[in-house]
Amino acid sequence: MRHIHVVLPIVVFSTAYFLTNYLQSNLKVISVNVLFFCITIALLTLYMSLKNKGFLNPFQNYFGLGDLLFYIAITPLFLLYNYVLFFITSLLFSIVMQFVLLKWIKKDSVPLAGLSALLLLFVIAKDVVFSVQKITLIR
C-alpha cells in the first residue's frame, strides 16, 4: 500500500500535464511552480532549524512524503500566482477542516494532501462548470 504514495502523484501529474499540454510554456510553468515550492520548503526548514538551534527535517515531523508529492504533482495545473494562491488556501482549508473534523479524526497530524486534494476537486469542478474567472489551466 506504500507504493500508492508514488504511483498516485505520478498519475495526477501526468493527467494534469496532458490536460494542460496545449500551453507552449508548460515546462516553464511546471519549473517555476516547483522552484517556488522548493524555496518554500527550504525556507521552512531554515526557519525551523534556526528556531530549534539545530537542523530539523520537516519531513520527519511536519510534512509528509505524500504532501510533497501532491504539491509537485499539481504544478502543471496552475500559473505561479494561482499556484501560490492554491497552496496558501489549501493550507488554511486543511487547518479549518482539521478543527471541523476533530471529533472524527483521532490523529494528531493533519491529512494535508488529502484535504488539499478535496479542495482541488472543488476548484476544478468550479473551473469546469462555471465560466467565471478560472484558477486552473484546465479549459
Image (tube, rainbow, N blue to C red):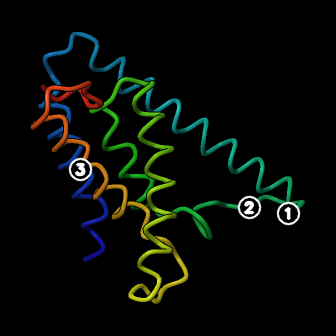
Is the residue 2 above or below the residue 21 in the image?
below
Nearest-to-viewer mark from 3 and 1? 3
Instruction: Tell me the residue at 24%/66% (across/down).
Output: 4
* Label 3 residue SS: helix
Q: Quick one: SS at disc 2?
A: loop
Q: Where 100 sits versus 127, above or below?
A: below
* Residue drawn 15% across the image and 22% down it: 21
Seen in the image, is 9 located left or right of residue 84? left
Picture disc at residue 122: 3
Which comes before the other along the chain, label 2 or label 3?
Answer: 2
Whether residue 73 is situated above or below residue 66 in the rendered picture: above
What is the x, y in percent for residue 7? Answer: 22, 58
Mark 1 = which residue? 52
Residue 39: quarter of image: top right
Does the residue at mark 2 contact the one at mark 3 (Cβ under 8 Å)? no
Residue receiving disc 2: 56
Name the amino acid type tagged 2: Leu
Which percent across, then down, holds residue 8? 22, 58
Label 3 packing within 10 angstroms: few (<14), some (14-19), many (20+): few
Q: CA distance from mark 2 to mark 3?
A: 34 Å
In the rendered image, the residue lying farthest to the top is 24
In the rendered image, residue 99, in percent from the top left (x then y), is placed at 50, 74
